[in-house]
Amino acid sequence: MNRKLKLLLVPLAGLALLTATAIPVLAKGQGNGPSAPASAQAAPPPGGGGPAVKPPDLRNMVRGTVESVSGNIITFKSGNTLAVDANTKYTAPKKPKASLADVVKGVDIVARVKKTDTGPLAVQVQVLGKIIGTVVHSGTVTAYTAGASITITGPKGGPATFIINGDTKINLPKGIAGLKTGDSVTVSGRTDPDTKTLVAKVIAVHKVRMVEGTVTAITSGSLTVKPATGDPINFKTDKDTIFTLKGVSAVSVNDKVKVVAEVQEDGTLLAKAVMDGVSIPSMLGRFGPKGRQGPMAPNFNKPGPFTPGNSPSGRPIPKA
């Protein structure tokens, strides 16, 4: 190979080497330009879902008990005020089309607000309900006027009278035709914040009754007992009635007894147990609420979307 041929081959070999190293670089940047750095590429959201949901700003929410409403101004018991306008949205329990008319004295509200030059303006108002405790009483009906009122006397307390209105529900067990004086019931209701009267929400009539009183008459198949309040009550007895005696050989007139009975389909009371001279704790808890609320008492404090004083996240909402 002569000198001229060697001088020609050397640059050609160098060009081939340069081309071989350049091809992979171009392959990495396929398309119309080089690839963007990895740090510049958008990272997928964690968990593979959409963008993170921003939690509500509790600084723009207030809560409180309404003292009055005048025009477009809501005044809270604290003395603070909140304005509303035609664009304010309202929600209330069991009212698909709530309005400012549902914001009345004594109700607790949660409001989402925005700041204006004249003060806070409500964007949305949620009515939570009246801030009153649920009142539960169990006992014997001593007075009853359908659609108007019911008075009950418990084993450890004086009489309590509840107002009955169109929203009151009466729960009757199978075999009991209607509510009447002498029935054993549990009444759950509330105290009206303005009149301070008790208003019945649910009246639950118990199929099993317990009566304590004085025996006034005895026959071969019945027993009449006069409670401390109310009229005498007649009980049927049969071969399955259990008599528990202490210090006496038989139940007699003028004895102090406790009778556990069951309401029959014809409305009569069949004595299941008669206790004479036996000191036992109140058995009301077995047939009704334990204390003030028990297994037979419905739950009347189901929280709604908000509980007074807290947001859905559990963080406290600023008081108005």
Image (cartoon, grey):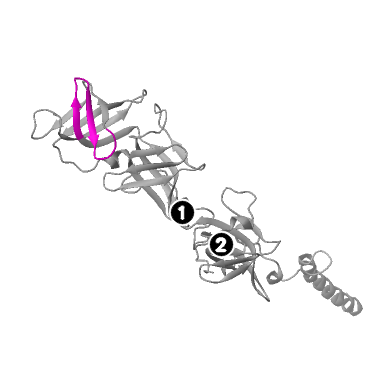
Closer to the N terminus: mark 2 or mark 1?
2
Q: Left or right of 167: which side holds 221?
A: left
Stretch of the chain drawn in magenta: 214-231
Q: Which residue is drawn at 80% across and 71% down?
A: 22
Q: At x 55% / y 61%, what residue is drawn?
A: 109
Relative to 163, 268 lies left or right: left
Tag of residue 192:
1
Q: Where residue 95 sits: x, y (%)?
A: 60, 49
Q: Name the kind of residue labelled 1 in the image.
A: Asp
Camera-side residue of 55 and 94: 94
Magenta span has 225? Answer: yes
The residue singled out by tag 2 in the image is 110
Q: Which residue type does callout 2 highlight?
A: Val
Res. 49 in view: no
Q: In which quarter of the image is the C terminus?
A: bottom right
Question: Which residue is painted at 49% across and 43% down in the image?
Answer: 165
Counting from the top left corner in percent of width and height, residue 30 is at 80, 64
Residue 46 or 250: which is nearer the viewer?
Answer: 250
Q: Which of 12 and 194 is in front in this view?
A: 194
Foreground pick, 218 / 245: 218
Q: In which quarter of the image is residue 259?
A: top left
Which image quadrant: the N terminus?
A: bottom right
Q: Is mark 1 on a helix, strand or loop?
A: loop
Q: Where is residue 145 shown, x and y percent of the image? A: 42, 38
Q: Mark 2 and mark 1: span between their CA atoms?
A: 21 Å
Q: How crowded is mark 1: few (under 14 residues within 10 Å), some or many (20 or more)?
A: some
Secondary element at image label 2: strand
